[in-house]
Structures are given as C-alpha cells and as structure tokens.
Image (cartoon, coloured by chain):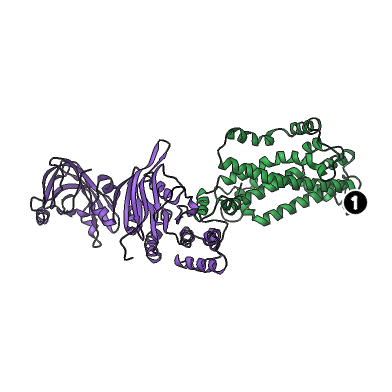
Amino acid sequence: MAIFSRTPRAPLEYSRTLWMRLWVGAVMVFLYAPLVVLMIFSFNDSKRNVVWRGFTLKYYDKALGNDVLVEALVNSLTIAALATLISLILGAVAAVMLWRFRFPLKGAVDGTISLPIIVPEICMGVAFLIFFAKWLEWPTDLIWPFNLGAIIIAHITFCFPFVTMVVRSRLATFNREQEEAAKDLGAGEWAVFRDVLIPHMRPALIAGALLSFTLSLDDFVITYFTSGPDTITFPVKVYSMVRFSVTPEVNAASTLLILLTILLTAVALKLQGVKAIAETH
Amino acid sequence: MTDAPRPIIQIQNVSKRFGKVTAVDNVSLDIMAGEFFVLLGPSGCGKTTLLRMIAGFELPTEGHILIDGQDMAGIPPNKRPVNMVFQSYAVFPHMSVADNVAYGLKIAGVRGGEVKDRVAEALELVKLGGFEDRMPDQMSGGQRQRVALARSLIMRPKVLLLDEPLSALDAKLRAQMQFELADLQDQVGITFVTVTHDQDEALSMASRIAVINKGDVAQLAGPSDLYEYPANRFVADFVGSVNIFEGKLTLDEPDRAAVDCPGLGRVYLNHGVTGPHGADVWVALRPEKIYLHVPGEGKAVRAAAQDAPEGHNFARGTIKGMSYLGDITLYDIELESGARLRVSRPNLSRHDQEDFTWDDKVSMHWRADSPVVLLG
C-alpha cells in the first residue's frame, strides 16, 4: 500500500483507507461536478451548452444587460434581505419565549411552530395563493417594493421556524448561572438580555440568517404561487428562460448568484468565526 | 473592629418549600460582620437553597432574611448589597477579563478612569494583574474562578457568597485556594459565606461552620469545636471519620463516666456526661485517637492505665484491612466482639507501615478524654 504514509493505520483512521477515499471522492464529484460544469459553460462561446466552442465573457454582458433578469435578481435579493431580517426577529423572539416562559397552549404553539418546515411546499404555495388572491384579495398593482409584500410574508412563514430551531438548540446550552451572575452584579432584565443572552445567541442568529437568506433566495414553488402577474423573482425568471432553451446566459446568471451566496457566507463566517457557528450544530 | 460582633446577615425562622419538599426547615442563624462563615452539609441538605435565598434568587416560603439590619423581602438580587461567586463561575465567555470584572460597575453607571483603576486593583487582588485582555476560553478553571472573584469583589459588597467555590479544582489547586481565599478574606475584610460539602474545606477556611442536615442546622460551631465536640451522630459522622458505638450510660459523675458498649466493651471517660442514668447513648471515637500496639498486652495496658482511673480503655482485635495513604495508614480492625474499628496511624518513619499487616493480632488503647458521648 504505497500510497499511504509509512506509519500503520490506526483502527479508527478510516480516512486513510482506499475505499473511504474513493467514496469521499465520488460524493464530491456528484455534489460539485454539476456546479463546476455550469460555471465552465457560462464561458462557452456557443448558443447551446453541449459543445465547448471557446472562451467568452459575452454572456455575462448579456445577462447583466437583460433588464428583466436584473430586475428579477434585485427583487430576489430584496425579498431575501427583508424576509431574513423579519424571520430573524420573529424566530429569535419565538425561541426565547418557548425556552424561557410557561404560558397557556405552549405545547400547541411548540408543535405548530415548525409545521411550515414539514408541510410540502406545493401545499403551502396553493394555500398562499388562495389566502392572498381569493381570501385577502391582496392588491397586485402596488409600487416596488410593496408589490413584493405577499412573497415576503410567504417566505417569512417558512424561514422563521428554521431560525427558531437553531436559536432554541443554542439556548439549550445556556448556563442560567450567567444570567444570575449578571443580575447579581446589578443588571435588570433588559441588561441581562442585551449583555448576556444575545451574545450567547449570536452564532445561532448568524446561522439562522444564512439559512433564511438562502432558503428565500432560491425558493421557487411558493414564490411561483404567490407572485402577482407583474412580479418576477430570479428562480422564476430562470425557469421561464430554461423553458425555451438552456443558454449560457442562464449559466452566467447562475454563476453570479453562486458567487454572491459564497461571498455572503464568507462575510458571515468572518464576522463570527467558523468555530462559533459550527458550535450551534 | 473594637465593637462587639455585629450580625451582618440575620436569618430568622426561614423555611423554603418546593411543592411538598421542604428544602430549608425553620432555620435561624446570625452571621457576623467580618466572618468566614461556612454552610456545610451533604448534597441536597438545603445549604445552597439557603445561600440562594440570601442572594435573592429564591424567596423564603416563611421567615425573614435581614442584611445589615434591612429586611430583604421584596428586594430583587440586583438590588442587594451581596455578590455571589457561582459554582460554574459563570464568567461571561464573550467578554474579556477586564469587561467581565467591570460589568457590575458599568451597570452601576461608573465611567472612565475609575473603572480602569478599580479593575486593575481587583485583578491585582486575585493575582491576575496583566490578564485584562484575555478571553475566558484562554484561561484555566482556576483563573476563571479568580475572574469571578474579582468581578464580585470590585462591587465592594457587604457579603460575598461563594457556592461550592473549590469543587471544580484539582486537589493541589484546591488546597492552595483554601489558603488564598482565607487570606483574601483577611485582606478585604468582607464577610464571606461559603457553601460546601467538603469538610476539609470547611475546617480549613471557616471561622464558624453551620452543619446543615435535612434543611436544619445540626450544629453551629468553630472548626475545632465541631470536630472535637460534635453535638450529635450526624455531625460526628459527617465531619471527619469516626467510629460510633451504641451503649448504655452506666456511670455518670461530675469527674468521670462510663458507657457499656456491646461492641467495644466498657468505655471510660474522665469527665461527666450529665445524661440520665441507663440512657441509650452513642460513643464516638476518632480513628486517629486510638493507639495501636503489637500484641504482648502489657505495654498497652500500662499506657491505658496511666490516665483512666476507673479502668482501662483497652481493646483487642485482628487487622482485617489496611490502606496505606502515605502520611497515614488506615487499619480496619475486627474486635473480639465482631464489631469493626477504624484506626489511623501516622507513618512517623519510613518503615512504620510495615509494623502491622493483615491478620495481625493487635491491642489498642485510647485516652479517657478521647471518646465523645452523644445523646442524639
């Protein structure tokens, strides 16, 4: 076994066995090969994606020049940002409430709060369609960004349970003696919350925000059902473009989106430190 | 400190019930200003509940707690003139050492240079000078405890409460911190109230100890009184190790007494007990107060005779077990009655532990002032 280093393998060092390395390699290929191909073909100088015809940046030009596509992207980012912000507040408050207080029907609230995670998206989509269009008669002709209201509300509905989940598991590790120590040193309830509890929740808040943002950004089904006739988001626009043909323009737009997501994640990790976020599991 | 001792904490008929469980049962205690007071007891005896009631984290079901003469009823923990060092230390992990220590001052609205000076002073006090910028996760458990101490001391409380302060430290560090805490208390002159289940800790640090059993004060005394004159079987057994034998009081005069113990024989004392004649009593005898002799009884009997005018405190037995602890060796001895007696013997020279071994027949004697007669 020449490919291994000279020291003998310890019983639990599976990462040094050949079959494990092959397996990990295969998983990596299946996970990332499609993305890599997508990115490479965004530079393909051809109208169709199948054959490589040389390097070009013109489809980036074209994508960025596509007004509808850019509008869709701006819409998506706006929706994601607002939905994340509100989900974060709502989710964190719900988590603290469920962790800290006893109140009537707590069991019921606890049970239903994560319902949006398990209800199939298509059901949620139809439900929102009926809710907004038929029952609430939500106006569809508002000016930007108010025309995104219905979508944002829908996104908050399925995002905030994730925030609640992450924050709650973080709160479970909170040492109540820290709260008592703060009070012992003179802090009131608000100061305890600000100085002790929020710093403890911070990695979970960042993890929850990242989750919400990505969930909202790439949601198709629910958005498709809740968007009005004149509102378009990035996934919906890409879908409609792909229906005609998969052009490198779609690849270019997708690549930009991937880069944007990676960048945001990197910033978030940098803000908090990878370790602290990993701690929230 | 010329005045008579002034009570800084007065616990008056305090009871605490959690549902049907009575954690603290009608306790009354006065803790004096400047004392190093220890609440000692087994886990679940109510000592921590008592401490938390002083801090204000639990409210008494009945009774009153006065701090410096002021009734604490209705005063929340953040308004009480006491500070607490928690068992887990509860150092804020996201704040630097300096921010941790300054926290109470910042809440109190102290600003600017005074904060910096007092933080430096407090850290100096706990020997952490220069650690201002460290984060708690870069420190050892012992150092984090010092941060917690500094964080409380900086508030200049009337009373410092410590919940099991040494339980998380290793044996060496614990011994060192026992001295340091006592020194620190001397230095700052603040009343310390400590909760512990460790009798060594209590004996070494306290000026007075309240032994708590099942929510009640079993005995309140200074360390040596507690050890040498335990008031009841619980205290005798909980503080230090002890041999306890049941017996009947058969002789009780002002200057001497005798107890007939089925297990140990007749035990003579050189002082009176003032208990009812023929009463059921218990004799407590500490392992280190028993002298061990090689067989050939003459020497033991002579030694026993020297201070026992009425008879000899003398017994025979067989060594059934021994454990060598370095400084002392513990012997488990089976008496002729079948009862067991624990005897400890200092290893005064390097080969002392070789004098006795398993299944050796031995003789024992003890002085007539060593046994303690317990009525309850």
Residue A91 x %, y %: 66, 43
Residue B302 x %, y %: 9, 56
**Residue A98 versus residue A221: which sits nearer the camera?**
A98
**Is the residue A238 above or below the residue B176 in the image?**
above
Q: Is residue B317 left or right of residue B324?
A: left
Residue A36 x %, y %: 78, 49
Residue B205 x %, y %: 34, 59
Q: Is residue B121 left or right of residue A276?
A: left
Residue A151: name its quadrant.
Answer: top right
Residue at figure coordinates x 55%, y 58% from the top left: B107
**Residue B153 versus residue B175: which sits nearer the camera?**
B153
Q: Is residue B189 left or right of residue A89?
A: left
In the displayed orientation, state which residue is furthest to the right. A47
In the displayed orientation, state which residue is furthest to the left. B310
**Residue B306 versus residue A99: which sits nearer the camera?**
A99
- Secondary structure under badge 1? helix
- State which chain disc 1 sits on: A
| Residue marked by disc 1 | A65
Please rate how many residues cluster around mark 1, counting C-alpha atoms within 10 Å: few if below 14, some from 14 to 19, many from 20: few
- Looking at the rendered structure, the kind of residue marked 1 is Gly
Chain coloured green: A
Residue at figure coordinates x 79%, y 49% from the top left: A257
Residue A28 visible, this angle: no
The total of numbered circles placed on residues is: 1
Chain B rendering hue: purple
